[in-house]
């Protein structure tokens, strides 16, 4: 039996596993990912690459005199890969892509990097509120330590097993049909914090050595721990990945009641530099714009023409 999901997220995972011939290491990895929603990969990234990324981040990303045309502040710099070959190499690091192919059985598309200088202290969330796909859950993050991460410098925290919760968006949190926005994001964070409490998930922290990587699935709840040692750095890079042949959207800015989606129309594949095409399991859908960057997806002409007919009627 198949589900319209990544196989590692499928309720039929155990059954599907039987039909695959995997090495012992691969078997351990896919089982862990399925069950917990993450895998830790100690020492995955060579120190030489780590040092290059860190050096670039220090000299360029967090140097206000170095011109960048992406979002930046003292904590994080978005899409630094555009200015750093090392950051780009890390985002498309072959062993990470190989593992993602194994887990998702689709071509991974690195589409966003975030470089951090210090801990984010970000509240608990699932990345699905920011990055979702149709079909669902074809998204993940790979977080790499560019220095040793301790209890004190704001390690990433996460809740094993929380990836199996529903994909919470405003339609499951609020009783209004309003479109999502940054203004109500705090309500989402409050909700997630409460969910973690009532479900009694166990918190884990990614205390890591320089070069260790953590891959997390789209829906696992995670965030950044408080920085308890004043002035400590937490050099790190996270890359967010989608997978081929999906539609990509942002639930936080979509209307998840009416299914009007804020589509991510200008994604770039960091590996190839090419624009990311969108499709649904091999089929192009029609995008009917209903707002700025907001669309209804449709099977095509039949629906389109009935919408135009009703518009015409209304205009009479
Ligand atoms: O690095 C952190 O503290 C959290 C990062 C995060 O949530 C993300 O990249 O999705
Ligand atoms: Fe996140």
Image (cartoon, helix red, strand yellow):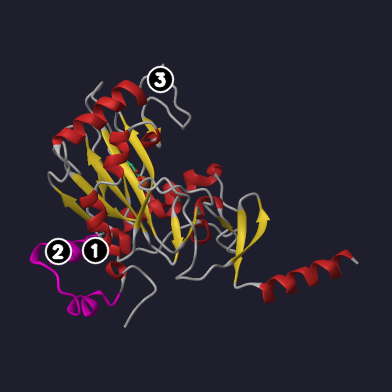
Element under label 3? loop
> Which residue has dot 3 on it?
66
Q: Which image quadrant for residue 49?
A: top left
Residue drawn at point x = 67 percent, y = 57 percent: 290
Relative image position of residue 238 (x, y in whole percent): 31, 42
Residue 252, placed above or below residue 50: below
Mark number, residue 255: none
Sequence order check: which comes first, mark 1 or mark 3? 3
Of pointers 3 and 2, the one earlier in the residue sequence:
2
Q: Is residue 12 part of the magenta span, yes or no?
A: yes
Front-most of 237 and 217?
Answer: 237
Q: Which secondary structure, mark 2?
A: helix
Q: Count how many numbered circles sit on residues in the image.
A: 3
Say the numbered circle drawn on residue 26.
2
Highlighted magenta segment, given as a residue range = 11-36
Residue 22: name its quadrant: bottom left
* Residue 147, image x, y percentages: 18, 32
Which percent across, then down, holds residue 131?
A: 44, 53
Mark closer to the chain start, 2 or 1: 2
In the depicted structure, whether residue 105 falls above or below residue 213: below
Snapshot quadrant of residue 288: bottom right
Q: Looking at the image, is 192 positioned above or below residue 74?
A: below
Q: Is mark 3 within 8 Å of ligand 1?
A: no
Q: Residue at x 46, y 32 (%)?
A: 71
* Residue pointed to by mark 1: 102
Q: Residue furthest bottom?
A: 1
Q: Are marks 2 and 1 in contact (CB under 8 Å)?
A: yes
Q: Residue furthest right?
A: 316
């Amino acid at each position: 039996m198949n589900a319209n999901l990544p196989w590692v997220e499928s309720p039929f995972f155990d059954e599907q596993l039987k039909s695959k011939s995997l090495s012992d290491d691969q078997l351990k990895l896919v089982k862990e990912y399925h069950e917990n929603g993450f895998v830790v990969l100690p020492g995955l990234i060579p120190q030489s690459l780590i040092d290059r990324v860190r050096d670039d981040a220090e000299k360029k990303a967090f140097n206000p005199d170095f011109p960048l045309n992406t979002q930046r502040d003292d904590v994080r710099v978005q899409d630094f890969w555009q200015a750093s070959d090392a950051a780009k190499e890390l985002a498309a690091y072959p062993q990470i892509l190989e593992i993602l192919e194994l887990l998702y059985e689709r071509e991974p598309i690195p589409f966003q990097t975030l470089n951090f200088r210090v801990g984010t202290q970000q509240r608990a969330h699932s990345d699905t509120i920011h990055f979702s796909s149709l079909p669902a859950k074809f998204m993940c993050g790979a977080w790499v330590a560019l220095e040793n991460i301790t209890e004190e410098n704001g390690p990433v925290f996460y809740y094993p097993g929380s990836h199996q919760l529903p994909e919470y968006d405003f339609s499951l949190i609020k009783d209004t049909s309003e479109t999502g926005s940054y203004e109500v994001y705090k309500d989402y964070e409050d909700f997630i914090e409460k969910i973690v409490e009532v479900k009694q998930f166990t918190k884990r922290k990614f205390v890591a050595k320089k070069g260790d990587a953590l891959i997390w699935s789209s829906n696992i709840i995670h965030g950044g721990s408080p920085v308890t040692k004043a002035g400590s750095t937490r050099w790190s890079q996270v890359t967010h990945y989608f997978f081929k042949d999906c539609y990509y959207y942002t639930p936080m800015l979509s209307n998840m009641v009416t299914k009007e989606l804020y589509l991510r129309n200008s994604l770039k594949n960091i590996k190839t530099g090419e624009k990311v095409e969108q499709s649904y399991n091999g089929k192009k859908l029609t995008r009917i714009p209903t707002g700025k960057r907001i669309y209804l997806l449709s099977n095509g002409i039949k629906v389109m023409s009935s919408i135009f007919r009703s518009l015409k009627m209304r205009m009479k």
